[in-house]
Amino acid sequence: MTTPQLHIVVAERLSREAMEKLRAAGRVTVLDSCDEDSLLKAMADCDALLVRTFSQVTREVIEHAPNLKVIGRGGVGLDNIDTLAASEHGVSVVYTPAAATGAVAELTIGLMLSLLRDIPANDAAIRRGEYTQARANAMANELSEMTLGIIGMGRIGQAVGRRCQVGFGMSVIYHDIVDPLALDFPAKFVDKESLYDQADIVSLHVPLTDLTRWLIDKEALSQFKPGALLINTSRGRVVDSLALANRLRNGALGGAALDVLDEEPPANDHPLFGAPRIIFTPHIGAKTPMSQARMNAVVDDVIRVLRGSPPVTSAHIHQ
Ligand code: NAD
């Protein structure tokens, strides 16, 4: 049923199928840019706002939208949405919390193995004609003799832990501020300091909140086991880039692999670009067709709210 009086603003690209569903539900405006100015201009008569990773839905944006009923976030993290302001203004926030769990877990393990076996550097050395030298220098431990330390044992943390313990025979320790209750694989809860001290590989799977912003700072990094590897597929601002660059430069850390950065896209002079033993991917954790399809399904919940029904996945569970 078409309800043309509803105005739906799409700030970041969605699939054709998702767009068709939205167009059947109301008048749709697709923004050219998702910067704050563009959002503010589009808000006046907006009933529903659809965003992905890069739109910043601030209190100001929400307060510019007197008709706003629902914000749909195709994705997992809600750090780009002021959920408190939304709830104060009676605006539902719906999202797709489990959309990318397997995809991010697989990328995390890919980064872990790439770093451990130096795959990108070996590839580059061969192309430079340094085959013999690269082979002579290669030597790494196996995952089965290593301890994985997971910070944030939620959906993705558990998916990583399970694959690493069951699939690779790693010992798994973890830290979380909430008890994950019954895990279906062996893993031991430890405090943060013990995790830094014992883990050969530290993998971050926390949301970006006031508690986790710059969690891995100079002091935390100084407690890491010598030669430890750091994997971050959560959010860039969980890690202090400058402190990490320094620890990599002075050889205290064995390496880092980052899918996320404090600044995306990063400036050409980003402090981590000059650091050794680091691998980057451009925030591709959720870039699989299956994850994308699940994220696009956020439109179903947005339409549900516009029609007066309760959403399936509202953000209150994260507040
Ligand atoms: P989740 O909510 O299931 O798990 C997060 C866990 O972190 C929870 O168990 C929570 O209690 C814990 N936590 C929160 N604050 C903490 C703290 N201060 N110390 C220790 N633990 C803390 O979320 P998830 O589905 O596992 O996703 C985790 C994060 O991964 C998301 O919030 C998002 O930022 C990121 N993510 C990245 C990509 C990507 O493309 N790289 C894709 C999806 C999600």
Image (cartoon, rainbow, N blue to C red):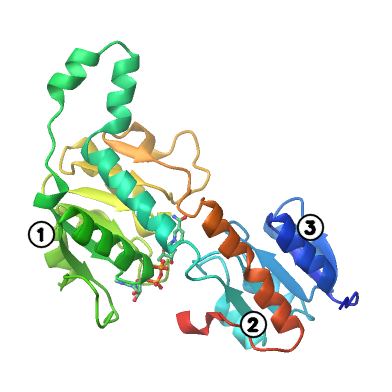
Residue drawn at (13%, 37%), measured in percent from left and top?
140
Question: What is the x, y in percent for residue 262?
Answer: 44, 51
Q: Is 15 drawn above or below residue 94 in the view shown?
A: above
Side of 68 where 132 appears, left or right: left
Using the image as rendered, state which of residue 15 and residue 83 is in the foreground: 15
Any part of residue 69 in sight? no
Q: Indicate the quadrant where residue 275 lies.
A: top left
Which residue is the site of mark 1?
Answer: 198
Q: Reading the chain from its start, which is encountered first: label 2 or label 3?
A: 3
Label 1: which secondary element? helix
Side of 255 where 310 appears, left or right: right
Amino acid residing under circle 2: Ser
- For ligand 1, tell me if the residue under mark 1 lies within 8 Å: no
Amino acid residing under circle 3: Val
Question: What is the x, y in percent for residue 84?
Answer: 56, 81
- For ligand 1, tell me if the residue under mark 2 lies within 8 Å: no
Please, which residue is most extreme toward the top here? 129
Q: Reading the chain from its start, which is encountered first: label 2 or label 1?
A: 2
Q: Label 2 to label 3, Cα distance in Å?
A: 21 Å
Residue drawn at (67%, 88%), measured in percent from left and top?
90
Please, which residue is most extreme toward the front here? 167
Q: Reading the chain from its start, which is encountered first: label 1 or label 3?
A: 3
Q: Quadrant of ligand 1?
A: bottom left
Residue drawn at (60%, 76%), measured in percent from left and top?
94
Amino acid residing under circle 1: Gln
Which residue is the site of mark 3?
Answer: 30
Side of 213 where 57 appears, left or right: right
Any part of residue 293 in sight? yes
Residue 92 is tagged as 2
Q: Label 2 to label 1, Cα distance in Å?
A: 42 Å
